[in-house]
């Protein structure tokens, strides 16, 4: 069996890289904070922006250790700057400098940026960001035809095993899954949120991310949604390997080095920490200040030792992850045993007969 290919975030702390390499991580990904107004997949105040020279030294060090490096150019919106000569020059210069330092791939969510990278830098592998929201065989096929080497699927597809199984062999090896993000299942705010983050450098001080605020409140009021969220436990990576998927993305580049190393160790050993929530990137209802985001809201814990068998429900086709707020008894029952902390405890009770839903045929999912 092939070993998993792990692409893990970096915050440009060089001390991360030797242990990443020792643990068997395959590549790191990151970006300088300011792309000349092009935008990012994360708001600038959260990224602890790295100077270009710092990024280039970090890339060179990663390559010396045998790690690949992916330059992230994945804003959900660029303000159409890729159509201007100035925007094109900035992008080409940035990719050229990164490639010269040893960057092995570039992640994009925009087909025009993809075309620019593919034509100007054919030696650099092209990855399609999770923010491109690829959730169909047609979408995978389109991006591969356009020259993509790896397509990171929209997280809502992580537990749709009927979809994953019917992905052709010619495509499945190019699929990557985001493994440790705790977000609402089938979140309706995904597209808008990526646009908010792309323009995070122009919001006023004290601005509160409305998407994370809603997500945080919904999760705390409905703890079973933390179980229905499409994360992948380190212990369950083998389930995806069984259907031919060997590529996994580990987030988040806004986190501390200690947090990132905990994630890397957990997936390398295929063993979760006692509190699974400590390796999941969960919403924190941040408020933008001059240079930082201050987390707010409550906190919860997820006991890893009562999650055995959780994924079987999805593997066996009893649910595809398309879950309403009411949910079904599967995730509610697990949440009653696994989720503790500052949550809406009343929501851990079984739903009323009016609310109760069942996981029916695979195509129906949780309704």
Image (tube, grey):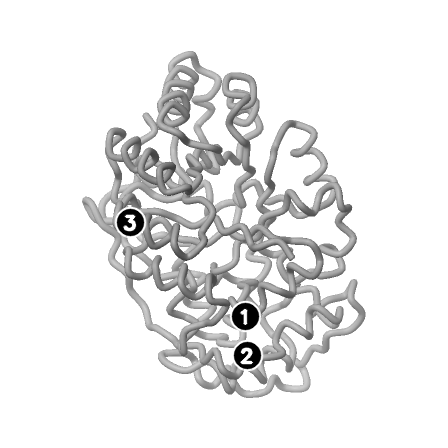
Dot in front, 3 or 1? 1
Few, some or many C-alpha atoms within 10 Å of disc 1 (few <14, some 14-19, many ≥20)?
some
Residue that carries the numbered disc 1 in the rendered image = 235
Give the quarter of the image for residue 286: bottom left
Where 93 falls versus 62 (above or below)?
Answer: above
Report which residue position mark 2 lands on. Answer: 307
Q: Tell me the distance, in whole angstroms, between the alpha carbons under discs 3 and 1.
A: 38 Å
Q: Which residue lies under the disc numbered 3?
A: 207
Q: CA distance from mark 3 to mark 2?
A: 37 Å
Where 217 falls versus 301 (above or below)? above
Left or right, residue 129 beside residue 217:
right
User: As drawn, which residue projects farthest toward the left?
Assistant: 290
Point out residue 335 in the picture as x, y percentages from the top left corner.
52, 81
| Tally of marks | 3
Q: Between 121 and 194, which is closer to the camera in this rendering?
A: 121
Of tags 3 and 2, which is closer to the observer? Answer: 2
The answer to which of marks 3 and 2 sits earlier in the sequence is: 3
Query: Residue 339 versus residue 239: which sits nearer the camera?
Result: 239
Residue at image position (38%, 37%) is 63
Residue 70 in the figure: left or right of residue 47:
right
Instruction: Assess whether mark 1 and mark 2 are in contact (beta carbons under 8 angstroms).
Output: yes
Compare marks 3 and 1 and give the one earlier in the sequence: 3
* Secondary structure found at label 3: loop
Q: Earlier in the sequence, mark 2 or mark 1?
A: 1
Element assignment for label 1: helix
């Amino acid at each position: 069996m092939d070993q998993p290919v792990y692409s893990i975030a970096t915050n440009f702390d060089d001390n991360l890289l030797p242990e990443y390499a020792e643990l068997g991580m395959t590549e790191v990904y990151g970006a300088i904070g300011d792309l000349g107004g092009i935008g990012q997949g994360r708001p600038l105040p959260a990224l602890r922006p790295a100077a270009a020279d710092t990024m280039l030294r970090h890339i060179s060090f990663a390559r010396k250790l045998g790690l690949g490096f992916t330059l992230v150019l994945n804003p959900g919106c660029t303000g159409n700057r890729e159509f201007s000569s100035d925007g094109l020059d900035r992008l080409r210069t940035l990719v050229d400098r990164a490639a010269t330092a040893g960057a092995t791939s570039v992640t994009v969510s925009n087909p025009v940026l993809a075309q620019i990278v593919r034509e100007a830098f054919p030696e650099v592998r092209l990855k399609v960001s999770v923010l491109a929201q690829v959730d169909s065989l047609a979408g995978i096929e389109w991006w591969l035809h356009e020259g993509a080497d790896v397509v990171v699927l929209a997280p809502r597809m992580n537990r749709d095993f009927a979809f994953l199984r019917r992905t052709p062999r010619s495509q499945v090896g190019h699929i990557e899954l985001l493994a440790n993000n705790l977000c609402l299942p089938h979140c309706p705010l995904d597209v808008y949120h990526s646009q908010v983050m792309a323009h995070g450098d122009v919001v006023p001080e004290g601005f509160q991310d409305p998407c994370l605020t809603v997500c945080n409140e919904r999760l705390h009021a409905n703890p079973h949604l933390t179980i229905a969220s499409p994360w992948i436990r380190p212990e369950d990576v083998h389930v995806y390997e069984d259907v031919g998927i060997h590529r996994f993305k580990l987030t988040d580049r806004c986190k501390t080095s200690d947090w990132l190393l905990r994630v890397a160790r957990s997936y390398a050993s295929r063993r979760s920490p006692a509190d699974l929530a400590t390796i999941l990137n969960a919403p924190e209802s941040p408020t933008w200040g001059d240079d930082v985001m201050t987390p707010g809201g409550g906190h919860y814990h997820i006991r890893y030792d009562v999650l055995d068998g959780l994924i079987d429900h999805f593997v066996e086709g009893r649910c595809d992850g398309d879950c309403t707020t009411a949910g079904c008894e599967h995730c509610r029952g697990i949440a009653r045993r696994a989720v503790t902390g500052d949550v809406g405890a009343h929501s851990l009770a079984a739903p009323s007969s009016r609310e109760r839903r069942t996981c029916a045929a695979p195509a129906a999912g949780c309704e």
